[in-house]
Amino acid sequence: MEVAAIDLLPHELLLVIFKLYIDQETPARDLVALSLVCKLWRDVVEGTASLWCPISGGDRLPYLRKALAMARDVPLKIKYSDSVANIDPETFWAQIGGRISQYQSFEITTKHQWDQILAVLKQASTPSLKTLYLEGPWVKGWKETVVTLFEGEPASGALKDLHVGGIPLAIAPLRLSGLRSLRLHGLPIISVEEVLRLLRESPGLEECDLFYLFCLRDASFTLPPDHPTIQLSRLRSLNLRGLPISIMHLILSVIRIQKLRKFSVDVTIEQPGRSPISDLFTTKISHLVPSLKDLVEKAGCIEMFSRRKKYYKISVGGFMIELGGGGHQRSHLQETLNWVFSNLGGHLQALPVSLQVDESRCSTDRFIWLASYLNVTKLDLLDRIHIRQLRNSRPREIISLLSRPLESANNQWLLPDLESIEMSLLNKDGGSKILDMVNARPLLYRRAEGAKTRRRCSQAI
């Protein structure tokens, strides 16, 4: 009898292939399917308990029970998400609740049954837990004002990855340290001191995301003169969004980073007269400039998105900043770009710009200002109006602007270096306006320095 080539592979290599085949949303179902292929595969699958350690709410109840039985006493990777669940939350928690001592990772994204989920985590320790990912409903939906895990005892020293979103979880009692990744989103009860302690006691931190910690909105904290700097030599990604500018400035002024791959901040200016440069990019964060320079060194273009009158997003390489808020002014964008050019590299000013604007919300004055200030080579005109309203939306003023020279600028064209434009054709007069622009705009096909540059208009519906 001829033996299949795959059956000649060492079991270790066969296990690698099986792990690559398994869908993490339905791991038990896929393992059962593999075990039905032949006796050899069944012996390998059912004889390797570690294959069954992913426990997913995407599996149906019979598969879930099979996985728990086959996993025996190996560390478990628990994952449940409303978006892929094929079993109701109450049944899922009832099946896995008694195995908490085996949890290696616990990743939950749901709006339901949090009382049952947290009841397990409140009363027992998890000595093997390395990853804790809890993404719940918005804070207003909680009965409890504070959720304390593990009977108030510190978390296991094995815990390296923490993600908490939308849950009023008390972080301080966990006494976390040595984290590899930290993501806190929408927590209502954390303090500035605890944030700094988490950073200080996790020198090996690689990813840090602090989003919309509204409890810090009115926080005031002053570093003592002898406060030590926080060394984060392994940090690769830093995202600060929805935080008061003063808190962002505090964090940036105290941390020391060697090599970043991604840096993202969201600067919300609520009061007139404030400025992203004078409030955030001060001399106290000048030590970060070399790392930020590395992020933009190989950038090939600047990406900019303008969604509404007082919102801009600027992205250059791995550097991204969002500007917005009731006190935001047009000059803040220019001021921020000038800071980028003067501090991160003058060569950036010559880079082409890919500009996205919401056509239905962008006034002609604002578009002319953007077009005059930026070297735009690619334009994407988005339209957020509902499809049923789109056909009767206002005339396409931006398309009209691009179809003729500006009378106020000595017959100069807007966006003279434009190479690509994308837009919707659903507007009632969209087709005719676009044809007018294509016909009227000069040098649709041209040769520049011996190389042919093609201007194209693509349909994006």
Image (spheres, rainbow, N blue to C red):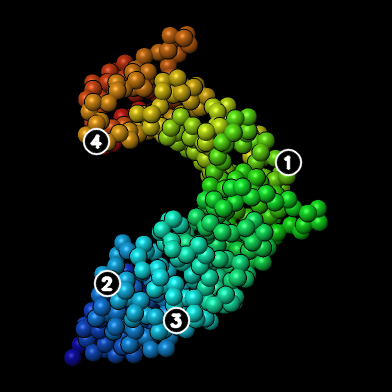
Name the residue located 32 percent from the left edge and 71 percent from the top edge.
89
Q: Quadrant of the C terminus?
A: top left
Q: Given the current orientation, which residue lies at the most extreme left position? A: 1
Q: Is residue 419 above or below residue 144?
A: above
Mark 1 is surrounded, within 10 Å at the Cα level, by few (under 14), some (14 to 19) or many (20 or more) other residues, namely: few
- Mark 3 lies on residue: 100
Residue 259, position in %: x, y? 63, 55
The crowd level at tag 3 (other Cα within 10 Å; few <14, some 14-19, many 20+) is many
- Residue corresponding to mark 4: 387
Residue occupied by mark 1 = 283
* Residue in the foreground of this view, choosing between 402 and 198: 198
Q: CA distance from mark 1 to mark 2?
A: 54 Å
Q: Which residue is mark 2?
A: 87
**Which residue type does callout 3 highlight?**
Ile
Q: Nearer the viewer, residue 138 or 369?
A: 138
The amino acid type of the residue labelled 2 equals Ile
- Marks 4 and 1 sit apart, C-alpha to C-alpha, by 48 Å
Towards the viewer: 149 or 410:
149
> Label 4's element?
helix
Mark 2, residues whose alpha carbon is within 10 Å: few (<14), some, or many (≥20)?
some
Q: Is residue 27 above or below residue 254?
A: below
